[in-house]
Amino acid sequence: MGDENAPEWIPLAIASAILILDSLVFGVAPSGPWGDTGFSIGVIGMVGLSMGYVAWYRFTFKRRGLIPWIDLWKTPEESVKRVFAVAVAFLVLAWVSGNPMQPYLPDPTGLVLTLVGLLIALQSGYAYLVMGPLKED
């Protein structure tokens, strides 16, 4: 698929940056269902992160979708190592945000980062198994 057929990713990236910036810096949000702006700010941040992921996927793979199939990877042997390193980085960041940085961050930050790190590690493990022990000849 050529670049002329690639889906738009720039509007999603801009919207993602604005939502994440609002969530982290400005904190402009309605009071939310429980009268707590913190919940609304968290939802805005999660929507921004989701839009950022979709923009990254469209930019990287030049197609619509959400799941980075291994067939789309240019160098899966190298990429699986990078994906695992990112998973470890997220898990370290989750530990840091849940322990020494806990007083400065919202309570579920470490839990959310742990979830993301474990999902990335699951993708890495799956890719390793498909390219190695479970490879079809």
Image (spheres, rainbow, N blue to C red):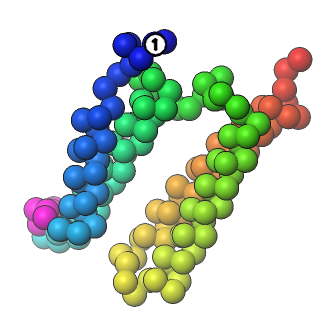
Q: Number of numbered discs present?
A: 1
Decide if residue 10 is on the left or right side of residue 100.
Answer: left
Q: In x, y percent, where is residue 63?
A: 44, 21
- Check disc 1 and report the residue beneath it: 2
Magenta segment's dominant SS is loop
Q: Position of residue 8 (x, y in %)?
A: 31, 26
Question: Which quadrant, please, contains the C terminus?
Answer: top right
Res 26 seen here: yes
Q: Crowding near pointer 1: few (<14 within 10 Å), some, many (20+)?
A: few
Query: What residue lies at 45% left-to-right and 23% top-to-bottom?
Result: 62
* The image quarter in which residue 74 lies: top right
Instruction: Name the element at disc 1.
Output: loop
Residue drawn where x is 23% and y is 69% of the image: 25
Above or below, 54 against 71 in this view is below
Task: Report whether 98 appears left or right of 135.
Answer: left
**Residue name at image x 54 percent, y 77 percent:** 96
Q: Tell me, yes or no, whether the highlighted magenta stretch contains residue 32.
A: yes
Q: What residue occupies the far front of the structure in this picture?
A: 3
Magenta-drawn stretch contains 45: no
Residue 89 in picture, x, y percent from top left: 61, 63
**Is residue 43 visible to us here?**
no
Whole-percent x and y of residue 107?
A: 40, 76
The image shows residue 46, relative to residue 13, as above or below, that is: below
Amino acid beneath label 1: Gly
Q: Based on the displayed image, in which of its 4 quarters is residue 129 positioned?
A: top right
Look at the picture and state if 136 lies above or below 70.
above
Question: Between residues 60 and 19, which one lies in front from this camera angle?
Answer: 60
Q: Which residues are magenta?
A: 28-34
Q: Residue at x 46, y 83 (%)?
A: 101
Residue 131 is left or right of residue 52, and the answer is right
